[in-house]
Amino acid sequence: MSDLSFAERVSGHAWTVWPTARDLVLRPHHAAFFEHTIPIVDDQFGPTALSCSLAVPEGATSVVVLVHGLGSSRHSAPVQRAAVELHRLGLATLALDLRGADRRGGGFYHMALTEDLTAACASALCKPFQKVFVLGFSMGGHVALHFAATRAERRLAGVAALCTPLDLRQSQQHLDQATLAFYRRWVLRGLKGIYDAVARRHAVAVPARDVWRSGTFHEWDRLTVAKRFGFASPEDYYERCSARWALPKLAVESVLVLAQNDPIVPPELALPWVSDAAAGTLRVCVLPRGGHLQFPNGQDCGLGRGGSGVVEQIARHWQRL
């Protein structure tokens, strides 16, 4: 964001904050959802389940797995809005909570943990569909790109990541700046709620009260992710798990959509590494207007004809594959 004008910075914050505030009051609602759980086994906390919401329009042969952002859940407004739009276009959706995001205390995730997506795709809920797509929001897109490199699902036909960084270290340094304290507190509050629910049910390495005191993503990752998943330090986690390392291994076409004025994930947290992707596997679009996970309609994502909104353009592109 260093090269943005003052007006562009204000626009990015406005497009991030105001639509988010609106959605807290006027939440999107998808009447066609049915709630389910997918059983999994956490290697530390034992048997648990992933909460999810499935919606299947008549005649749907493809399903889109929707992956929420960091500290969020399947009930977030961007996920719900996308589900409504995809349903309108005839695509089934499985809005998935990564482990622990439902606050039931079954565990917690990190940003390269793809086992939850593997379990979702292998579940009875997804078995009827001929094709599987994954749409990830913010850090959910980071998980989705890792999944696209695993070759764990033979029906996977495409992945899209919205406002997703590719380097975790640079993302942490950016988000831990004093000027982004408002956004940081918002996301950390969600993450701490997930950890607190785990600590109420299981023995954990760090007491929840100490985690609640953490004020940066670096501190969060030191106290929780590094200890839980065996990383030597947050830096070790960032180096080993950044999505940029997945790009050369992408097995399906992936779409990365960024917003030029995004204050949370500015394009420079992704663009330096996009050329590392396997040939023909990554389409990148930087939209001139919008904020974090908020895009005004009428902008071209470069995916061919069809649709004015970002999700609609991605969906229509997938329907042509």
Image (cartoon, rainbow, N blue to C red):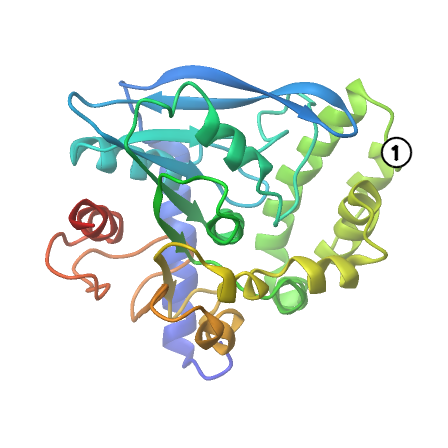
Q: Residue furthest left?
A: 305
Image x and y of residue 84, in percent: 26, 32
Q: Which of the pair 178/201 is nearer the observer?
A: 201
> Quick check: can you spot residue 265?
no
Q: Secondary structure at mark 1?
A: loop
Residue 211 position, x and y percent, is: 81, 41
**Image quarter for residue 181?**
bottom right
Q: Give the residue pinned by disc 1.
A: 207
Q: Position of residue 287 (x, y in %)?
A: 30, 68
Query: In this orientation, which residue lies closer to the viewer: 296 or 255?
Result: 255
Residue in the image at 29% along x and 24% along y: 30
On screen, residue 40 above or below 281: above
Q: Is residue 229 above or below residue 32?
A: below
Q: Amino acid at mark 1?
A: Pro
Q: Would you say 106 lies left or right of 246 here?
A: right
Q: Quadrant of residue 33?
A: top left
Question: Could you tell me residue 209's position as x and y percent?
Answer: 85, 34
Give the mark count: 1
Q: Residue at x 43, y 61 (%)?
A: 13
Seen from this angle, which residue lies furthest bottom?
A: 3
Kindly identify the residue that appears in the image at 27 percent across and 18 percent down: 31
Crowding near the residue tagged with mark 1, few <14, some 14–19, many ≥20 C-alpha atoms within 10 Å: some
Q: Residue at x 51, y 81 (%)?
A: 2
* Residue 3 appearing in the image: yes
